[in-house]
Amino acid sequence: MSDQWHIYAANIEDRTAWISFNASHAQRAESDNRDHVLKVRVALKEPTSDGMPGSEEFPALLELDRALEDYVAAMGGVFVGRLTHDGCRYFYYYASAPGAAVELRLRELGETHGYTLKYLYQSDPGHRRYHDELYPTPDDWVVVRDLETLSRLREAGDDARVDRRIDHWAYFATGDEADAFARWAGGSGFSGAQVDQDDDRWRVRYHHIGTVRLADITTYTIRSERRARELNGEYDGWESSVEKG
Protein backbone atom coordinates (compact mmCIF):
# COMPACT_ATOMS: atom_id res chain seq x y z
CA MET A 1 0.00 0.00 0.00
CA SER A 2 1.45 3.35 -1.04
CA ASP A 3 1.67 6.17 1.46
CA GLN A 4 -0.99 8.88 1.30
CA TRP A 5 0.06 12.06 3.08
CA HIS A 6 -2.38 14.84 3.92
CA ILE A 7 -2.28 18.06 5.89
CA TYR A 8 -4.95 19.96 7.78
CA ALA A 9 -5.46 22.68 10.36
CA ALA A 10 -7.18 21.95 13.68
CA ASN A 11 -8.02 23.89 16.81
CA ILE A 12 -6.22 22.71 19.95
CA GLU A 13 -6.74 24.68 23.16
CA ASP A 14 -7.95 27.70 21.16
CA ARG A 15 -4.82 27.82 19.01
CA THR A 16 -4.30 26.59 15.46
CA ALA A 17 -2.37 23.36 14.97
CA TRP A 18 -1.13 22.11 11.61
CA ILE A 19 -1.07 18.34 11.28
CA SER A 20 0.55 16.26 8.56
CA PHE A 21 -0.22 12.52 8.63
CA ASN A 22 0.05 9.34 6.61
CA ALA A 23 -3.54 8.24 6.01
CA SER A 24 -2.41 4.81 4.78
CA HIS A 25 -1.17 3.94 8.25
CA ALA A 26 -4.78 3.72 9.46
CA GLN A 27 -5.33 0.60 7.32
CA ARG A 28 -2.17 -1.19 8.42
CA ALA A 29 -2.11 -0.13 12.08
CA GLU A 30 -4.12 -3.12 13.36
CA SER A 31 -1.73 -5.67 11.89
CA ASP A 32 1.47 -3.65 12.36
CA ASN A 33 3.72 -5.36 14.93
CA ARG A 34 5.57 -2.12 15.67
CA ASP A 35 3.81 -1.64 18.98
CA HIS A 36 5.77 1.22 20.57
CA VAL A 37 5.16 4.89 19.86
CA LEU A 38 8.01 7.38 19.87
CA LYS A 39 6.80 10.98 20.09
CA VAL A 40 9.57 13.56 19.84
CA ARG A 41 8.98 17.16 20.94
CA VAL A 42 10.98 20.06 19.47
CA ALA A 43 10.62 23.59 20.86
CA LEU A 44 10.78 26.09 18.00
CA LYS A 45 13.54 28.67 18.32
CA GLU A 46 11.62 31.70 17.07
CA PRO A 47 7.95 30.81 16.58
CA THR A 48 5.62 33.26 14.89
CA SER A 49 2.78 34.89 16.80
CA ASP A 50 0.51 31.97 15.89
CA GLY A 51 3.02 29.41 17.19
CA MET A 52 4.35 28.26 13.82
CA PRO A 53 7.98 28.13 12.63
CA GLY A 54 9.29 31.14 10.75
CA SER A 55 10.67 30.76 7.24
CA GLU A 56 14.28 31.02 8.49
CA GLU A 57 13.82 27.97 10.71
CA PHE A 58 12.34 25.69 8.06
CA PRO A 59 15.68 24.39 6.69
CA ALA A 60 16.92 23.34 10.15
CA LEU A 61 13.62 21.62 10.95
CA LEU A 62 13.70 19.81 7.61
CA GLU A 63 17.21 18.50 8.29
CA LEU A 64 16.18 17.36 11.77
CA ASP A 65 13.07 15.72 10.32
CA ARG A 66 15.19 13.72 7.87
CA ALA A 67 17.72 12.72 10.53
CA LEU A 68 14.99 11.49 12.89
CA GLU A 69 13.27 9.52 10.15
CA ASP A 70 16.58 7.92 9.11
CA TYR A 71 17.27 6.95 12.72
CA VAL A 72 13.86 5.37 13.22
CA ALA A 73 13.94 3.63 9.83
CA ALA A 74 17.31 2.09 10.71
CA MET A 75 15.69 0.34 13.68
CA GLY A 76 12.75 -0.86 11.58
CA GLY A 77 10.37 1.93 12.54
CA VAL A 78 8.01 4.12 10.53
CA PHE A 79 7.22 7.83 10.53
CA VAL A 80 3.44 8.46 10.66
CA GLY A 81 3.04 12.22 11.11
CA ARG A 82 3.90 15.54 12.68
CA LEU A 83 1.94 18.14 14.61
CA THR A 84 2.92 21.80 15.01
CA HIS A 85 1.20 23.81 17.73
CA ASP A 86 1.89 26.65 20.13
CA GLY A 87 5.61 26.95 19.49
CA CYS A 88 6.42 23.23 19.34
CA ARG A 89 6.67 20.53 16.70
CA TYR A 90 5.94 16.89 17.53
CA PHE A 91 7.14 13.97 15.40
CA TYR A 92 5.38 10.58 15.66
CA TYR A 93 6.95 7.19 14.90
CA TYR A 94 6.12 3.53 15.52
CA ALA A 95 8.76 0.89 16.14
CA SER A 96 9.44 -2.33 17.91
CA ALA A 97 11.13 -1.66 21.25
CA PRO A 98 14.19 0.45 20.34
CA GLY A 99 15.92 -0.16 23.66
CA ALA A 100 17.74 2.08 26.09
CA ALA A 101 19.90 3.71 23.40
CA VAL A 102 17.03 5.95 22.25
CA GLU A 103 17.70 8.66 24.84
CA LEU A 104 21.39 8.87 23.96
CA ARG A 105 20.75 8.91 20.21
CA LEU A 106 18.09 11.61 20.47
CA ARG A 107 20.40 13.73 22.58
CA GLU A 108 23.11 13.37 19.93
CA LEU A 109 20.72 14.26 17.13
CA GLY A 110 19.48 17.29 19.03
CA GLU A 111 23.01 18.55 19.63
CA THR A 112 23.93 18.02 15.99
CA HIS A 113 20.95 20.03 14.77
CA GLY A 114 20.84 22.65 17.51
CA TYR A 115 17.74 21.51 19.40
CA THR A 116 16.95 19.99 22.76
CA LEU A 117 14.73 17.00 22.03
CA LYS A 118 12.24 15.68 24.54
CA TYR A 119 10.40 12.46 23.91
CA LEU A 120 7.73 10.03 25.00
CA TYR A 121 8.37 6.36 24.32
CA GLN A 122 5.80 3.81 25.40
CA SER A 123 3.88 0.71 24.44
CA ASP A 124 0.97 1.52 22.12
CA PRO A 125 -0.20 -1.71 20.46
CA GLY A 126 -3.45 -0.12 19.28
CA HIS A 127 -1.64 2.89 17.78
CA ARG A 128 -3.92 5.15 19.80
CA ARG A 129 -1.55 8.11 19.63
CA TYR A 130 -1.83 8.06 15.85
CA HIS A 131 -5.62 7.77 15.89
CA ASP A 132 -6.23 10.26 18.71
CA GLU A 133 -3.62 12.93 17.97
CA LEU A 134 -3.03 12.81 14.21
CA TYR A 135 -5.93 11.13 12.42
CA PRO A 136 -8.71 13.53 11.31
CA THR A 137 -12.21 13.71 12.72
CA PRO A 138 -15.04 13.93 10.14
CA ASP A 139 -14.84 17.75 10.39
CA ASP A 140 -11.06 17.62 9.93
CA TRP A 141 -11.45 15.53 6.78
CA VAL A 142 -13.50 18.38 5.34
CA VAL A 143 -10.56 20.72 5.96
CA VAL A 144 -8.20 18.19 4.34
CA ARG A 145 -10.32 18.20 1.18
CA ASP A 146 -10.75 21.99 1.28
CA LEU A 147 -6.99 22.49 1.43
CA GLU A 148 -6.46 20.17 -1.52
CA THR A 149 -9.07 22.08 -3.58
CA LEU A 150 -7.53 25.40 -2.55
CA SER A 151 -4.10 24.13 -3.59
CA ARG A 152 -5.38 23.31 -7.08
CA LEU A 153 -7.00 26.75 -7.38
CA ARG A 154 -3.81 28.46 -6.19
CA GLU A 155 -1.74 26.54 -8.74
CA ALA A 156 -4.12 27.82 -11.43
CA GLY A 157 -3.47 31.41 -10.33
CA ASP A 158 -6.59 31.98 -8.25
CA ASP A 159 -6.87 34.99 -5.92
CA ALA A 160 -8.55 33.54 -2.83
CA ARG A 161 -9.67 37.01 -1.68
CA VAL A 162 -12.11 37.48 -4.57
CA ASP A 163 -15.82 36.84 -3.98
CA ARG A 164 -17.32 34.34 -6.39
CA ARG A 165 -20.06 31.72 -6.71
CA ILE A 166 -19.12 28.46 -5.00
CA ASP A 167 -21.15 25.38 -5.92
CA HIS A 168 -21.74 22.50 -3.50
CA TRP A 169 -23.18 18.98 -3.78
CA ALA A 170 -24.64 16.53 -1.30
CA TYR A 171 -26.10 13.05 -1.86
CA PHE A 172 -28.79 11.09 -0.03
CA ALA A 173 -30.46 7.70 -0.19
CA THR A 174 -34.02 9.09 -0.14
CA GLY A 175 -35.85 12.07 -1.56
CA ASP A 176 -37.15 13.01 1.88
CA GLU A 177 -33.62 13.32 3.23
CA ALA A 178 -32.55 15.37 0.22
CA ASP A 179 -35.55 17.67 0.60
CA ALA A 180 -34.77 18.17 4.29
CA PHE A 181 -31.19 19.09 3.43
CA ALA A 182 -32.33 21.53 0.74
CA ARG A 183 -34.62 23.26 3.24
CA TRP A 184 -31.73 23.50 5.69
CA ALA A 185 -29.44 24.96 3.03
CA GLY A 186 -32.00 27.60 2.10
CA GLY A 187 -32.11 28.79 5.70
CA SER A 188 -28.37 28.57 6.38
CA GLY A 189 -26.76 31.11 4.08
CA PHE A 190 -26.90 29.10 0.84
CA SER A 191 -28.94 29.76 -2.28
CA GLY A 192 -30.51 27.92 -5.19
CA ALA A 193 -30.88 24.49 -3.61
CA GLN A 194 -32.18 22.03 -6.21
CA VAL A 195 -33.00 18.36 -5.69
CA ASP A 196 -32.80 15.78 -8.47
CA GLN A 197 -32.16 12.07 -8.82
CA ASP A 198 -28.71 10.85 -9.88
CA ASP A 199 -28.89 7.10 -10.64
CA ASP A 200 -29.93 5.47 -7.35
CA ARG A 201 -29.23 8.51 -5.17
CA TRP A 202 -30.80 11.90 -4.60
CA ARG A 203 -28.59 14.92 -5.21
CA VAL A 204 -28.80 18.42 -3.79
CA ARG A 205 -27.01 21.17 -5.70
CA TYR A 206 -26.67 24.54 -3.99
CA HIS A 207 -24.28 27.48 -3.78
CA HIS A 208 -23.10 30.51 -1.85
CA ILE A 209 -21.21 33.69 -2.68
CA GLY A 210 -17.91 34.26 -0.90
CA THR A 211 -14.13 34.04 -0.94
CA VAL A 212 -12.13 30.84 -0.85
CA ARG A 213 -9.93 31.85 2.04
CA LEU A 214 -9.66 28.80 4.28
CA ALA A 215 -11.38 30.44 7.26
CA ASP A 216 -14.28 31.50 5.01
CA ILE A 217 -14.85 28.33 3.00
CA THR A 218 -14.73 26.01 6.02
CA THR A 219 -17.62 27.86 7.68
CA TYR A 220 -19.76 26.55 4.81
CA THR A 221 -18.20 23.15 4.18
CA ILE A 222 -18.08 21.94 7.78
CA ARG A 223 -21.73 22.90 8.35
CA SER A 224 -22.66 21.09 5.14
CA GLU A 225 -20.77 17.98 6.20
CA ARG A 226 -22.40 17.93 9.62
CA ARG A 227 -25.94 18.42 8.33
CA ALA A 228 -25.54 15.84 5.56
CA ARG A 229 -24.22 13.34 8.09
CA GLU A 230 -27.18 14.02 10.40
CA LEU A 231 -29.49 13.15 7.52
CA ASN A 232 -27.57 9.96 6.66
CA GLY A 233 -26.16 11.57 3.55
CA GLU A 234 -22.79 12.51 2.12
CA TYR A 235 -21.45 16.00 1.48
CA ASP A 236 -19.51 15.72 -1.79
CA GLY A 237 -17.53 18.96 -1.73
CA TRP A 238 -17.44 22.14 -3.79
CA GLU A 239 -15.93 23.81 -6.80
CA SER A 240 -15.23 27.33 -7.93
CA SER A 241 -14.10 29.14 -11.04
CA VAL A 242 -10.54 30.49 -11.02
CA GLU A 243 -10.64 34.19 -10.16
CA LYS A 244 -7.55 36.27 -10.77
CA GLY A 245 -8.65 39.57 -9.28
Image (cartoon, rainbow, N blue to C red):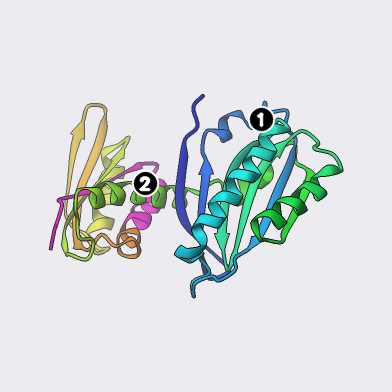
Residue farthest to the right? Answer: 100
Q: Quadrant of residue 243?
A: bottom left
Q: What SS does tag 2 mark?
A: helix
Question: Where residue 187 sits in the image (x, y, percent)?
Answer: 25, 63
Q: Is residue 223 magenta?
A: yes
Q: Which segment did they paint magenta?
A: 221-245
What distance separates the C-alpha of mark 1 from that of mark 2?
25 Å
Question: Where residue 214 sits in the image (x, y, percent)?
Answer: 33, 60
| Residue named by callout 2 | 145
Q: Decide: few, some or many residues near mark 1? Use Cα within 10 Å; few <14, some 14-19, many ≥20.
A: few
Question: Where residue 99 sits in the image (x, y, percent)?
Answer: 85, 39
Left of 45 or right of it: where is 245? left
Amino acid carrying mark 1 in the image: Glu
Residue farthest to the front? Answer: 112
Residue farthest to the bottom? Answer: 49
Q: Is residue 202 magenta?
A: no
| Residue named by callout 1 | 30
Q: Quadrant of the C terminus?
A: bottom left
Left of 181 or right of it: where is 102? right
Residue 136, visible in the rendered structure: no
The earlier-in-sequence mark between 1 and 2 is 1
